Amino acid sequence: MADAGFWDRTARKYAASKIADMGGYEETLARTRSFLMPEDHLLEIGCGTGSTALKLASCVKQMTATDISSEMLAIAEEKRADTDLENLRFIQTEATKPIDGAPFDVACAFSILHLLDDLDEGLAHLHSLIRPGGMLITKTACLRDMSFALPPLIKVMQWIGRAPHVNIFSSAALEDAMRKAGFEIIESGYHGKTRTTRFIAARRT
Ligand SMILES: C[S@@+](CC[C@H](N)C(=O)[O-])C[C@H]1O[C@@H](n2cnc3c(N)ncnc32)[C@H](O)[C@@H]1O
């Protein structure tokens, strides 16, 4: 089940934490921007504290950013209040629920697909939210590609309430699931130093 309570509890700490690999983050922003058009309505699911949404909104006509956590979105609204962005709205909702304004030209899902209860169901829903020919842009922790010691460690962390529900899959399995959901992979690779968090841009066929 989606873990809003975990994210509400960790929101302020998450907001205060520094991006571990700024070069990788900047590269992801640049590659994402390359798929955006000024007329687009852009969706971001699992937007967290809104940092990325605030950086992308000025590239498109309209942006909708959603998250399950009210605490994450409260911080996002605080940050937005310091800007003059008028084309960005934040909505509290579960990633697999319908969203007013669909279909979107582009949907972004950064560090969220591995957190969904059911990856196939989540991808099928994203497919329904994107117009035909539109793009899904993702960056996802593919935990199966990491050390074999990690899954048991995550179990322990979950047991003591220090980790949310996560799905463990490889980048190859994620790409297969995206194709099965009706996406064509356009670009796939790693940004910055990480070799565990996969950037994938895919077109809705
Ligand atoms: C690891 S954070 C990533 C935040 C942001 N995308 C980023 O890259 O910094 C995961 C975010 O997804 C949200 N989330 C987790 N499960 C969700 C779900 N089922 N539906 C919507 N949002 C969810 C959490 O509240 C949290 O803000």
Image (cartoon, rainbow, N blue to C red):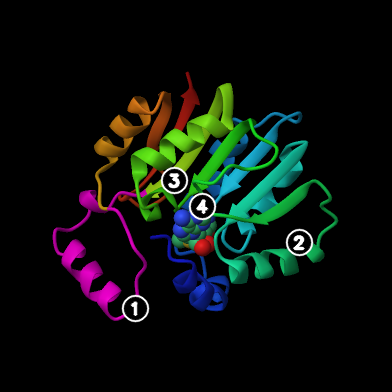
Q: Could you tell which of marks 4 and 1 lies nearer the N-terminus?
A: 4
Against 101, residue 113 (above or below) is below
Residue 172 rendering spot, x and y as whole percentages:
25, 36
Q: Which residue is mark 1?
A: 161
Instruction: Nearest to the eye among marks 4 and 2: give it.
Output: 2
Q: Nearer the viewer, residue 199 or 63?
A: 63
**Separation of residues labelled 4 and 1 (CA atoms):** 28 Å
> Residue at point 76% right, 28% down?
39
Looking at the rendered structure, the kind of residue marked 1 is: Gly
Q: Is residue 21 visible?
A: no
Q: CA distance from mark 1 to mark 2?
A: 30 Å
Q: Is residue 44 left or right of residue 100?
A: left
Q: Earlier in the sequence, mark 3 or mark 2?
A: 2
Q: CA distance from mark 3 to mark 2?
A: 23 Å
Q: Which mark is residue 25?
A: 4
Q: Going from the N terminus, do you reach mark 3 or mark 1 first?
A: 3
Asked if labels 2 and 1 touch by Cβ distance under 8 angstroms, the answer is no
Q: Is mark 3 within 8 Å of ligand 1?
A: yes
Residue contact between numbered discs 4 and 2, judged by CB atoms under 8 Å: no
Q: Are marks 3 and 1 in contact (CB under 8 Å)?
A: no
Question: Where is mark 3, residue-wise?
Answer: 139
Q: Amino acid at mark 3?
A: Lys
Quarter containing the N terminus:
bottom left
Magenta range: 141-167
Q: Secondary structure at mark 1?
A: loop
